[in-house]
Image (tube, coloured by chain):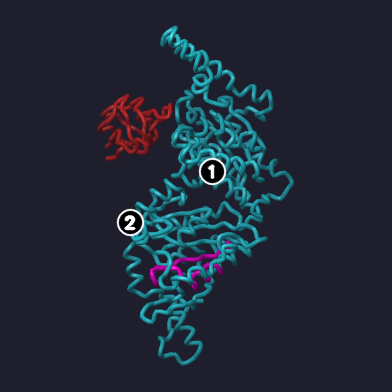
Chain colours: A red, B cyan
Amino acid sequence: MSEISAHITGTMFEVNVAVGDAVAIGDEVVVLESMKMELPVESEVAGTVTEVLCAPGDPVEAGQVLVRLA
Amino acid sequence: MSATDQAPVAGEVTTALEDLRARRAAALLGGGPERIERIHASGRLTARERIERLIDPGTWSELGMLAEPEIRRPDLPTTGDAIVTGLAKVDGRMVAILAIDATVMAGTTAPVNMRKQNRVAEWAGRRGFPLICLSDNDGGRVPDLLGWRFSGVPFDFTSFLQSPDGCPAIPRVTAALGPSYGDAALHAAMGDFVVMHEDAAIALSGPPVIRAAIGEDIDGAELGGPKVAAETNGAAHAVVETEDEAFARIRRFLSYLPSSAAEPAPVVDPVAPSRSTDTLDQVIPKSRRRGYDMHKLIEIVVDGGSYFPWGEQYGKSLLCGLARIEGHAVGVIASQPMHLAGALDVPALRKEAQFVELCDRFNLPLVFLQDVPGLMIGTHAERAGILQAYDNVVSRLARTKVPKIAVIVRKAFGGGHIALGGRPVKPDLLVAWPSAEMGFMEPATGVRTVHRRRLEALLESGGQEAHDERILELEAEWGAESQPWEAAANIILDDIIEPTDTRLLIATTIDFAWGTRERVSPTGA
């Protein structure tokens, strides 16, 4: 199992995956907003989404787990 | 210079030659099997094992093997006075090495030990080849440095921390492989490249001294571990999980540099970029608000696999790294829109100043890739000293003698634009992609500043909707002014280029910017 975490503190802007989705390396899983910028978070692993732990508008801390993959 | 297997033990010595062999055999054992075992148990290697793994086989020439401390300890191994120093080759190139021997008196420093350090450092500086420090110690030794003795330490800072007067600068590389306090921390402070093991710490004073002096209770990791040294104060430029990886990074770092500032940087065979220009469209997003990872653009521009990050975890909104373009070593300085939108804060500017110094000294052309919304502003940035950090970078950049090529990829605003190779710092070439936006301030900030009173009045008289509509109009006006065409028309920009031509243009310009002069900047030579 692997986790995708926020690399920066900000707000969740877009969530592009749902539980059950297949994810490839480099896919934009979510987009954060910080410093007036939309910052895509790419998956560094391939897998299937088992949990989505955030929704658009949520405040997000750097290091916070956003999505879990199996 | 190794001792023979048949070296006699002390007491059985019958000739001077046998005496020499016995002494050498003892020196090679360092602090003895028990202490070596303790070092191994803590996951570390001994000084001699480290040297062996770093250098080309069979190239070691030791200096000062028979050193002993001024204050002898009859009951303790004191061989070499806790440091191994000598000359060797790394990838065929001459280097000087000093490796702290933590098996002898915990690797602590004392006068003879310092003389040994100074001796190899001065040799490297006078004869023009890199100095490598393998650090792992607990600081100064007591009572060897007590009282009046400390003021008499034999370090000579005109030849230890820098090349002697009239001699060219040399690359200085430090690996912090264990606790590195006191003068081992000084090795890090003078390093052009500092790599640290993840369990190491770099700090002026170690935890016991801090507890005694100011009552602060803190452990080594919190004090100077990778979180601090690589991310907070930038003392380390890379963090590795194994000592072998540290040695690999040292070899790799040196491969980009000349042996001294008096020589051109080495040239190797060109390699095609690892990422094709066909992917440019996917790298730079259409929306100006969208971040992207600048590493991808660097991969399109530089020789495949040649990018070597330098200080990646410190000042993350700016990427600095060594790389090659058509086989020629360069320093890449590039905005990272994924952090702080690429705005330059104090750590980013401090990192840039050090990196510019490194490249200008060792004859590496500077390549800037700009996507910068500006300098970081606000309370935190002002208190951290953003003005001094900015002044430091731009005044230094303006005086660099190596070729400077700046490419505006997207945003180029305010002081950030200038700190990344804008016209006032005299780049040899300043070009932009058609996607560039240039200006004094970002449009969103600019219209709200310049039209503040009018917008407030409009909000009162016409309501929110009219206010927001006017802002959009004003932003569009500023946006039109920010396009690169007028900058090119007024030859502020040398050209606006097809993004796919970027690599070739940089390679060609490096040649023309060196021109017919020798490829050596007078800065360090």
Residue found at x 47% / y 50%: B237
Q: Marks 2 and 1: which is nearer the front? A: 2
Residue closest to the far bottom: B14
Q: Choose the circle earlier in sequence order: 2 or 1.
A: 2
Picture quadrant of residue A16:
top left
Is residue B114 shown in magenta?
yes
| Chain under disc 1 | B
* Residue B402 marker: none
The relative height of residue B419 versus residue B439 in the rendered view (above or below) is: below
Residue found at x 53% / y 70%: B154
* Residue A42 x %, y %: 38, 34
Mark 2 Cα-neighbour bin, 10 Å: few <14, some 14–19, many ≥20: few
The relative height of residue B337 versus residue B156 in the rendered view (above or below) is: above
Picture quadrant of residue B259:
bottom right
Left or right placement of residue B146 versus residue B525 in this view: left
The amino acid type of the residue labelled 1 equals Glu
* Residue B380 x %, y %: 44, 37
Name the residue beneath numbered marker 2: B215
Mark 1 Cα-neighbour bin, 10 Å: few <14, some 14–19, many ≥20: many
The amino acid type of the residue labelled 2 equals Gly
Query: Disc 2 and disc 1: Cα gap in Å?
Result: 35 Å
Which element carries disc 2, helix, strand or loop? Answer: loop
User: Where does the magenta region start and end?
Assistant: B93-119
* Residue B352 marker: 1
Residue found at x 42% / y 79%: B72
Q: Is residue B175 visible?
A: yes
Along the viewing direction, whichever of B286 and A32 lies nearer the viewer: A32
